[in-house]
Amino acid sequence: MFNNLSEKLDKALHVLKGHGSITEVNVAETLKEVRRALLDADVNFKIAKDFTNRVKEKALGLNVLTTLQPGQLMVKIVKDELTELMGGDVEGINMSGTPTIILMSGLQGSGKTTFSGKLANFLKNKKTKKPLLVACDVYRPAAVDQLHVVGDQIKVDVYSDKGNTDPVAIAKAGIAHAKQNGHNVVIIDTAGRLAVDEAMMKEISNIHEAIQPQETLFVVDAMTGQDAVNTAKAFNDVLNFDGVILTKLDGDTRGGAAISIKSVVNKPIKFIGTGEKMEAIDIFYPSRMADRILGMGDVVSLVERAQEQFDEEEARKLQKKIAKNQFGFDDFLKQIQQIKKMGNMKDLIGMIPGAGKMMKDVDIDDDAFKGIEAIIHSMTVKERTNPAIIDASRKKRIGKGSGTSVQEVNQLLKQFNQMSKMMKMMQGGKGKAMMQAMKN
Ligand code: GDP
């Protein structure tokens, strides 16, 4: 996420971060570099210029050069301004209304359908919400099918009416269906076109008018840079939407859209999409994003993600198993699946302060666990629960079945044994012995 921009800003702020004396000249030079970095990230020229002007004014106002740690203060000013530019405070979704009606808008391919599913899943996990997805794309039957696939996947009901060509009627019928069936949130997925056109605007505006949603969200692909900002403007003129959803931030986005969109449409970015999976949704926190862009990591989000996946009941069961020496490969597999649910590996590493920069050239395969999973899947139930029985001939068979080598099977078994030993020690609180085991 924003690797290029992070790198350039890091270079620009290098001097200020304590690698040289700070003078008026190099502050000016730094700001010029910051502006260049923003322009390269596809931030609009005027926004970039205003940004550096504001940083300069603030620095002058605070007499930065005469302070004890001018560099750090400058970096803080840049961070604060970046946060402000992206939205300042976090704004949630207006959940009033019975049911709450949420209308999705945006171009085709922006990620509307995927995000509708992610949001439904996100709300469903809050336990008090029972969402209904409504398919209002009357032009592409495949889009309706796609929403059904998403609904099945997350176990959320989907309302559609394939023969009907009137999206307003479908939306209304969907809301009525929600009321009858005890759904307290309705998420309406609409049709998009490849580019902004009048017919699409008229259609979405008609739906908006007819159903009076509590929340209208505009979904935009972050990869489209400046275009994203222009499209947002066009939709906002017609819909006066409440918030923006930036999708595909997991890709190699330059970051321009995230940075510019708020100041152009004056609407907050509410959520971001960081992958194709249903769990790849995050609340947008401008300040945390500024930290990430400035290479400061985002530990708070990392911990939150871990907490989301944490299941107390499961943890208790696991603890018992470890205590009884019954931790097996099936449990190991479950652990891997939980880590995978936290997001893609590169994204997770980027949240650790400093690690993103260190690992930027390392190619981290999102399917880093694939080989391990294949090996475990090739084991019999007996082998998984009692790995001690895996002898040479079993290893050979497992290797063959998983398309891996005996060495790889051996390596996994060794790691597994070390891990089991360590977990057992942690249970007993034998810190010293654990350190020793880690050394071996
Ligand atoms: P729609 O036409 O606006 O409904 O867009 P879709 O929801 O069908 O998404 C278009 C494509 O983008 C699909 O292949 C999705 O899997 C993909 N997609 C959506 N959101 C994300 C995201 O946050 N990250 C990535 N990498 N892909 C996404």
Image (cartoon, helix red, strand yellow):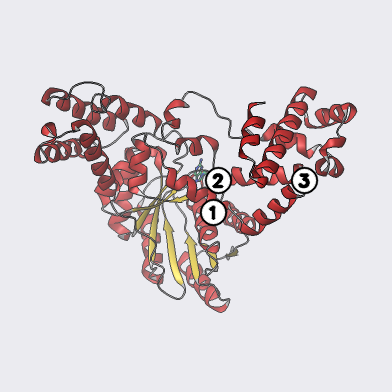
The type of residue carrying mark 1 is: Glu
The image shows residue 187, relative to residue 317, as above or below, that is: below
Looking at the rendered structure, the secondary structure element under dot 1 is helix
Query: In the rendered structure, which disc, 2 or 3, sits on the residue that comes first in sequence?
Result: 3
Residue under label 3, please give it: 325
Q: Closest to the observer: 47 or 110?
A: 47
Q: Is residue 15 left or right of residue 412?
A: left
Marks 2 and 3 sit apart, C-alpha to C-alpha, by 27 Å
Q: In which quarter of the image is residue 73?
A: top left
Looking at the image, the residue that sits furthest to the right is: 393
Q: Do the residues labelled 2 and 1 touch (CB within 8 Å)?
A: yes
Residue name at image x 27 percent, y 28 percent:
17
Residue name at image x 55 percent, y 45 percent:
342
Residue under label 2, please give it: 342
Looking at the image, the residue that sits furthest to the bottom is: 180
- Residue 396: give x, y in percent of width and height: 85, 26
Q: Is residue 162 left or right of residue 281?
A: right
**Could one spot residue 62 in this view of the protein?**
yes
Of badges 1 and 3, the one in the foreground is: 3
Query: In the rendered structure, which disc, 1 or 3, sits on the residue that comes first in sequence?
Result: 1
Q: In which quarter of the image is residue 440?
A: top right
Residue under label 1, please give it: 308
- Residue 272: give x, y in percent of width and height: 43, 48
The type of residue carrying mark 2 is: Met
- Mark 3 C-beta closer than 8 Å to ligand 1: no
Query: In the rendered structure, which disc, 2 or 1, sits on the residue that comes first in sequence?
Result: 1
Number of marks in the rendered image = 3
In the rendered image, the quadrant that contains the N terminus is top left
Q: Are marks 1 and 3 in contact (CB under 8 Å)?
A: no
Label 3 crowding class (10 Å Cα cut-off): few <14, some 14-19, many 20+? few
Label 2 crowding class (10 Å Cα cut-off): few <14, some 14-19, many 20+? many
